[in-house]
Image: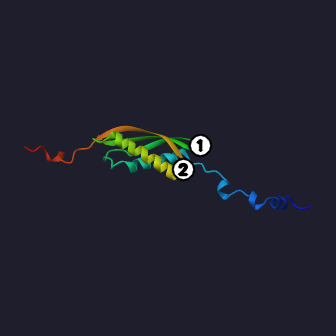
Amino acid sequence: MTPVSAQAGAARSPADRVAPGERGATRIADRVVAKIAGQAAREALAPLPADATGPYANVVLHHDTARVRVHLELGYPCDIGACCAAVRRRVVERVRELVRMDVPEVAVQVERLHLVPAPDADRGRAR
């Protein structure tokens, strides 16, 4: 009589073995994707005013899909639409690149605008 473990090992051929990449599962937490999205938003924006808080994100994950909401503050005047579009593009790009998730939706919420003085405003008015 042969031991059970020897029978199980002998019955399995090399073709029956599971490839290393298919043996387990990887789960990425919501907060990890949110950190990546927040950092991507920072990368997309020009330097923020000194009193502005950095962008942050909320994420809802469903399988390999991430829905992202980014909250940010911008300097004013600026092209708000262009800034939001740049943030959307960068967030989608970085999340796909780093965690291999689809990002069908990136909602950008501008929380506050900070008045940024024009470069020549401190010189005063010339006559």
Q: If you read the primary sequence from the N terminus, does the residue marked by circle 1 or circle 2 appear first?
A: 1
Q: x%, y% of residue 109?
A: 40, 37
**Which numbered marker is on residue 89?**
none
Contact between marks 1 and 2 (CB within 8 A): the answer is no
Residue at the extreme left of the image, as rendered: 127
Which residue in the protein does label 2 denote? 100
The type of residue carrying mark 2 is Arg
> Is 34 on the left or on the right of 78, as rendered?
right
Question: What is the distance, in whole Å, between disc 1 and disc 2 at their CAs?
Answer: 11 Å
The image position of residue 30, as x and y in percent, is 53, 44
Q: Can residue 126 be seen in the rendering of this structure?
A: yes
Mark 1 residue element: loop
Q: Residues within 10 Å of mark 2 (few under 14, many from 20)?
A: few
Q: Which label was assigned to residue 63?
A: 1
Instruction: Determine the image quadrant of residue 14.
Output: bottom right
Q: Residue at x 46, y 49 (%)?
A: 93
Q: How is the image coloured?
A: rainbow
Residue 109 vertical placement versus 54 (above, below): above
Horizontal arrangement in the rendering, residue 7 relative to residue 80 (left or right) = right
9 in relation to 94, above or below: below
Q: Residues within 10 Å of mark 1 (few under 14, many from 20)?
A: few
> Which residue shows up at 68% across the image and 57% down it?
19
Residue 115 spot, x, y in % from top left:
27, 41
Nearer to the camera, 47 or 79? 79
Q: Quadrant of the C terminus?
A: top left
* Amino acid type at mark 1: His
Residue 73 rendering spot, x and y as whole percentages = 36, 41
Name the residue located 18 percent from the left edge and 45 percent from the top edge: 121
